[in-house]
Image: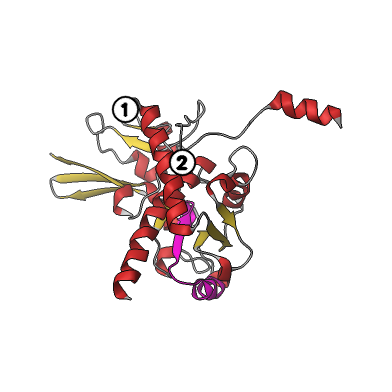
C-alpha cells in the first residue's frame, strides 16, 4: 500500500491547466495550414495534391483565386510538401472551432 | 496584461458560465456516425487524468435523453443516418449539436459517396464545427467553450418566447 502512496506523491498532479494556461502544441505538430499571399504564384499544385479536395483554384478570366477551407482539412501536409515556392505552410495552431463554416474559409485573390 | 493573465481570466469565465447556465454540469452524448474511431480515441482521452474534463462539470452520458449536447463524429453513413436522426429527436430542448472532426464538418477524406453523406449539417442544424483529424483534446475543450456561448443565446431565445 505504501508503494502506491509513495508513487502517487512522487508523480504529483498530471492534469493540464489548459483553458487557464495556453498549451503550445509539440514540435512537428500539424495544425492549421496558412497561405502566404505574397509568395503564391497560383500554380495549382496544392489543389491537385489535396486528398479531401478542400483547396480550390478558380480562374475567372483575369482574376485567379485560391480558396482553402479548414473545415474538411485532414492536416496531412501534402500541400506544404508540393508547393514550389513555400507559400503554404502548416502552423502549430489548433484552436479552430467556430460557429459557422465561413469563419474557416481562407481566400486569396490576384488579378493578372 | 500578458497572454497568460488573459487565458486565466478566460478559464474563470468558463467556470462561471458552466455554473450559471447548467447548474454545474454539461452532459454530452457521443454519437459515432461512421467515424474511423480516431475521434473516439480523443474523446476517451478527455476523461483521463491528464485532460480530465470532469473538472469543468462536463460528462459523457449513456443516453440522448440525459444529454444537453450531441457530439457527432464521422461523415454520417447511410446506415447511421436514421439512428442519428432518432438520437437528435430524443434529445431534450434546448440542445446543441457539435460536429467533431473533419469528416463530420465537411465529409473530410471520405468525401461524398453513395454510402456516406458529406457532413452532419446536411441532416440537422450544427452549432459548432470542430475541425481536426482528429482534433487534439485541447481543441475539443476549446470547441465546447465555443458551444457554451451558443447555448446561452438559445436559452435566452426560449425564455423570450415563453
Closer to us: A15 or B37: A15
Q: Residue at x 40, y 64 (%)?
A: B121
Task: Give the residue at mark 2.
Answer: A75
Residue B137: percent from left, percent from top: 54, 43
Based on the displayed image, in which of its 4 quarters is residue A12 positioned? top right
Based on the displayed image, in which of its 4 quarters is residue A13 positioned? top right
Task: Give the residue at mark 1.
Answer: A85
Please check whether the numbered discs 1 and 2 fall on a single chain: yes
Question: Neighbour class for label 2 at 10 Å: few (<14), some, many (≥20)?
Answer: many
Closer to us: B158 or A16: B158
Closer to us: B112 or B2: B2
Q: Chain of mark 2?
A: A
Residue B130 can be seen, yes or no: no
Q: Chain of mark 1?
A: A
State the extent of the magenta-drawn residues as a range. B81-104
Circle 1 or circle 2, nearest the eye: 2
- Whether residue B65 appears in magenta in the rendering, the answer is no
- Whether residue B90 appears in magenta in the rendering, the answer is yes
Q: Secondary structure at mark 1?
A: loop
> How far is the residue under mark 1 from the one under mark 2?
19 Å
- Above or below, B95 against B109 in this view is below
Amino acid at each position: 500500500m505504501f508503494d502506491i502512496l509513495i508513487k502517487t506523491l512522487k508523480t504529483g498532479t498530471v492534469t493540464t491547466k489548459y483553458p487557464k494556461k495556453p498549451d503550445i502544441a509539440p514540435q512537428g505538430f500539424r495544425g492549421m495550414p496558412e497561405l502566404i499571399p505574397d509568395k503564391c504564384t497560383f500554380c495549382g499544385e496544392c489543389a491537385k495534391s489535396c486528398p479531401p479536395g478542400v483547396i480550390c483554384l478558380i480562374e475567372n478570366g483575369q482574376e485567379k483565386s485560391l480558396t482553402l477551407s479548414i473545415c474538411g482539412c485532414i492536416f496531412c501536409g501534402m500541400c506544404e510538401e508540393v508547393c514550389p515556392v513555400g507559400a503554404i505552410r502548416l502552423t502549430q495552431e489548433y484552436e479552430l472551432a467556430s460557429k459557422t463554416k465561413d469563419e474557416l474559409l481562407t481566400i486569396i485573390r490576384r488579378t493578372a | 496584461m500578458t497572454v497568460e493573465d488573459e487565458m486565466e481570466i478566460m478559464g474563470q469565465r468558463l467556470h462561471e458560465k458552466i455554473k450559471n447556465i447548467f447548474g454545474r454540469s454539461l452532459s454530452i452524448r457521443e454519437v459515432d456516425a461512421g467515424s474511423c474511431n480516431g475521434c473516439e480515441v480523443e474523446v476517451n482521452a478527455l476523461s483521463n487524468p491528464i485532460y480530465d474534463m470532469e473538472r469543468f462539470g462536463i460528462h459523457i452520458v449513456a443516453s440522448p435523453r440525459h444529454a444537453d449536447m450531441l457530439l457527432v463524429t464521422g461523415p454520417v453513413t447511410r446506415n447511421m443516418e436514421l439512428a442519428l436522426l432518432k438520437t437528435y429527436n430524443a434529445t431534450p430542448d434546448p440542445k446543441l449539436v457539435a460536429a467533431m472532426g473533419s469528416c463530420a464538418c465537411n465529409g473530410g477524406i471520405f468525401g461524398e459517396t453513395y454510402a456516406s453523406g458529406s457532413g452532419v449539417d446536411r441532416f440537422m442544424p450544427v452549432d459548432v464545427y470542430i475541425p481536426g483529424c482528429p482534433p487534439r483534446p485541447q481543441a475539443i475543450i476549446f470547441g465546447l467553450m465555443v458551444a457554451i456561448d451558443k447555448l446561452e443565446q438559445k436559452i435566452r431565445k426560449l425564455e423570450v418566447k415563453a
